[in-house]
Image (tube, coloured by chain):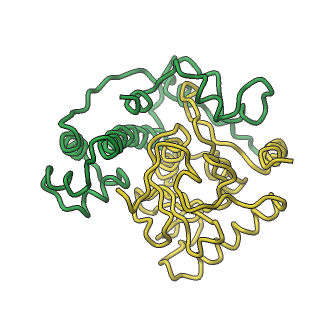
Chain colours: A green, B yellow
Amino acid sequence: MTTFQKKSLPQILSSDQPIPEGSLAYIEQRAINEFYNVVLSRYRFAKENHNLTKAELARRINKGQDQVSRWLSSPSNWTIGTVARLLVGINNEEAQLSYDSFIGRTATNFRAEDSFYSENVPDLTDYRQVNTTHMNMATFEATQ
Amino acid sequence: MSIRSAIKRHLRAQRLFVFNPELASDRCERLFIYDKEINDLLEGQWESGPSARRIGWLIADIESFVRGHEVVISLVPYQADAALFGRLSRATERIWDFRSRHPSPGIRIFGCWAEVDTFVGLGWYPRSLPWNGREPLGGRDSHSWEVAKLECKTKWDQLFPQFEKIGGEDIHDYISEKVTAANSL
């Protein structure tokens, strides 16, 4: 029996071989999910703090409420235009792009299994409270 | 013994596995734990071949949940529509599906909530088309759904005979933050 050792994404990308289709699909969906996360966090913020309704958003961007519901439920079938339309409709905003290499990022000091295996690492709930210096885009957005 | 201790025991015995993001720089804010059947799907040689792209998308969707991204869930059976998690019919059974819908065939991972922010996946199924050697679940009245739910329930009872699944009628009973109910969008 052959033992298969899965390579990490940075290992795959560090090779000069063509990037495997599975990895490319992961990277595509990761990007879509990042956009979705930002848009939904902006929508939830506007809903909770400025009483934005789905009906009002739909009216602002000239779409039906059913269409807006589908967009907000999932990023399936989103285009870059969908992102632009939703963000401007929610709070007159646009996405600002930045970029960063997948390779060479600093590892977080917390992996999922740590919450089960390490006696010294706080569990998931505590971790959220102590690790406030490492803010990704999503958490940054949520605090705005 | 807590359910966390029971999970730890199953992780050590490799009856259960815990999902980590592809990049070590991504932090985990929620836990997605799964059985060997799902592990075989996720950890297989999926970088190439016809299943590769679908599994790449599935991994990205699970990762989005684990990284603490915004999530839409549905407490109302048959009305999950595009939500990432949906509670399945007969809510008292406390069985959910994780829904990676795009592209076709959608993949459903059946499972239960062990704690807030901790989902335990106990079986996977293609939603609408045969895929990767498996028949699809089919329409919502299909017998396959009942079989899949029963398999999920049986696995839970074998792994956690002393522990009840998490239940409740508030979305925050399942996910602590950055969560929206599908019917309140």
Q: Quadrant of the C terminus of chain A?
A: top left
Q: Quadrant of residue A42?
A: top left
- The extreme right residue here reads B1
Between B156 and A132, the one nearer to me in the picture:
A132
User: Considering only vertical position in the picture, is B177 above or below B181?
Assistant: above
Relative horizontal placement of residue B18, taking residue A107 as reference (left or right): right
Tell me which residue sits at (56%, 74%) in the image. Answer: B89
Residue B113, percent across and down?
65, 55
Residue A59, percent across and down?
14, 55
User: Considering only vertical position in the picture, is B107 above or below B141?
Assistant: above
Q: Quadrant of residue B90?
A: bottom right
Relative horizontal placement of residue A30, taking residue A81 as reference (left or right): right
Residue A89, percent across and down?
19, 44
Between A32 and A114, the one nearer to me in the picture:
A114
User: Considering only vertical position in the picture, is A56 above or below A131?
Assistant: below
Q: Is residue A117 visible?
A: yes
Q: Is residue B44 visible?
A: no
Tell me which residue sits at (51%, 64%) in the image. Answer: B75
Residue B74, percent across and down?
47, 62
